[in-house]
Amino acid sequence: MKKSELRQLIKEEIKDIMNTKDDGASGYGEVMRKLTDKMTGGRIPDLSIKNTMRPKEIHVTFTERGRYYKITADGKDIKDGAFGIGVEKAEKYLKSITGMEEIDLLYVNDDMLDEITENLKNKGIKFTWDDSMSVD
């Protein structure tokens, strides 16, 4: 697809979204969120940092081994609105980048973390994790 065709497609989609009365879209952020969902089929979670699909580094923090706390990309919290994304969206995000079908951050184990690390390493993305929020 040529750049000009893509621009035209985006303009048409934005126009359609802006003309929809009952979709709850208000403001630029909502319009872009709806546009992203429409163009990607909802595969990409709503993330509020730039280049989240091609970060250089992804880091997951656990409260204790196996309990998800937060995820960051390139040192910035990945957020959904004002709050960090929950475990389901974090899993969806990692699945969309890795292409892995199964990622479970609630009951994570070292083997899964190693698999994510290797998968992302092959894509040129550094993946790290820690349980620095542990209360042990």
Image (tube, rainbow, N blue to C red):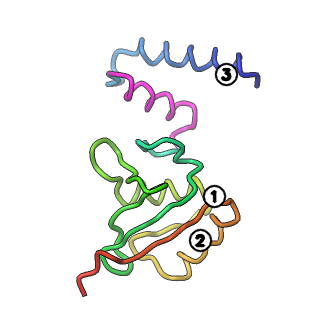
- Res 127 → quadrant: bottom right
**Residue with the mark numbered 2:** 117
Residue 34: say if magenta. Answer: yes
The magenta stretch is 27-42
Instruction: Please name the residue shown 57% across and 37% down the image.
Output: 40
Q: Decide which of tag 1 and tag 2 comes sooner along the chain.
A: 1
Residue 115: say if magenta. Answer: no
Dot 1 amino acid type: Gly
Look at the image and tell me in which quarter the N terminus lies: top right
The dot on residue 6 is 3
The residue nearer to you, when weighing 9 against 133, is 133
| 3D distance between C-alphas at marks 3 and 1 | 25 Å
- Res 116 → quadrant: bottom right
| 3D distance between C-alphas at marks 1 and 2 | 13 Å
Furthest-right residue in this view? 1
Instruction: Please name the residue shown 36% across and 62% down the image.
Output: 70
Dot 2 amino acid type: Thr
| 3D distance between C-alphas at marks 3 and 2 | 34 Å
Look at the numbered disc 3 and give the secondary structure of its residue: helix
Instruction: Please name the residue shown 58% across and 20% down the image.
Output: 10
Instruction: Please name the residue shown 32% across and 66% down the image.
Output: 69
Q: Is residue 27 found left or right of 49 in the rendered image?
A: left
Q: Tell how many labels.
A: 3
**Residue with the mark numbered 1:** 99
How busy is the neighbourhood of tag 2: few (under 14 within 10 Å), some, or many (20 plus)? some
Look at the numbered disc 2 and give the secondary structure of its residue: helix
